[in-house]
Amino acid sequence: MMLKQITEKTNLHPRNLHRLRYDFALLVENCPELKKYIGINEHDIETLDFSIPDAVKTLNKALLTTYYGIQKWDIPENYLCPPIPGRVDYIHYIADLLAESNNGVLPKGASVEGLDVGLGANCIYPLLGNASYGWSFVGTDVDEKALANCSQIIANNPKLIDFISLQLQLSSRFVFKNIITPEDKFAFTMCNPPFHSSELKAEKAALKKLSNLQGQKVTKAVLNFGGQNAELWCEGGELGFIKQLIYESAKYPMQCLWFTTLVAKQSHLSSIYKTLNKVNVVTTKTIAMAQGQKNSRMVAWTFLSEEQQKEWKFD
């Protein structure tokens, strides 16, 4: 019992399947190519070198196959490789949020539809959301190559074809415009916004991360680790993107139960709350989370009254 207390990742959501150490024997059984990346650390414990991009990507393949039934997952070179435990946490916290409007019951099934803003090439949130709760998704992005890869992932997993649809956002100036139609009703939107305000800042952060992982200074970024420009930075950075998200959400107040976004920098919260007040949201919630080794949080808002929230139909 003491061993579990030591190794359990208590900062992850209680329903997260990855709170304990990775079962490498099970993962290798489902994804044999992972074996070559597994080694023994100074504490005589099996581990992975997370500074090697292919090792991280192969671990993702193994996790998605073993725990979520996803086959042949892959991403193109230079695209963001997401940490599965942190990403699925976002899904679980959204489920908790929706349950508050559903008599405490976690809503499941395809009638619960989410909108993933900035899907990326990895398609990770729709994959995890569908596997965990049976939800359906619309995934949007400004990057055609990213969406093409998501389409390939879905084609490799035909059971997902009826649950995940992809939509190209034709203008990087907008988030919901040209995406949400008058007929749409989304239980939630979700977003992991670009963090940095310039390509230079994104590159410096990537080098710092690699240096920390390798325990020595790294001066050149490694392929597959950083991510594409649209994934990592935009004008105005995280705060600018989230403000745009909020202002546009006000144009679709009755078409979504909960708008949500991840917020990496706590210092941005004050400005985010002020913007939410400007557009007259009814309720705002901030939920603490852990994304990898960093503290993060989900900010959620709705324009629906408490009565309207309770009346929302999930089936």
Image (cartoon, rainbow, N blue to C red):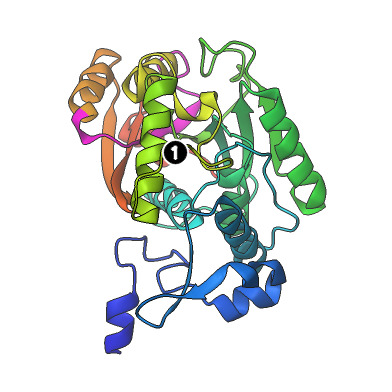
Is residue 24 shown above or below 143? below
The residue at 46%/29% (across/down) is: 232
Q: In the image, is residue 160 part of the stretch drawn in magenta?
A: no
Nearer to the camera, 175 or 222: 222
Where is residue 166 drawn, in percent x and y? 70, 31
The residue at 30%/22% (across/down) is: 281
Q: Which residues are magenta?
A: 250-267
Q: In the image, is residue 262 part of the stretch drawn in magenta?
A: yes
Where is residue 305 drawn, in percent x and y? 33, 29
The residue at 30%/44% (across/down) is: 296
Is residue 111 shown above or below 120? below
Residue pointed to by mark 1: 311
Nearer to the camera, 34 or 188: 34
Q: Amino acid at mark 1?
A: Glu
Where is residue 256 drawn, in percent x and y? 48, 29
Residue 227 in sight from this viewpoint = yes
The residue at 22%/35% (across/down) is: 266
Is residue 130 shown above or below 240? below
Nearer to the camera, 148 or 200: 200
Question: Which element type, helix, strand or loop, lies under badge 1?
Answer: helix
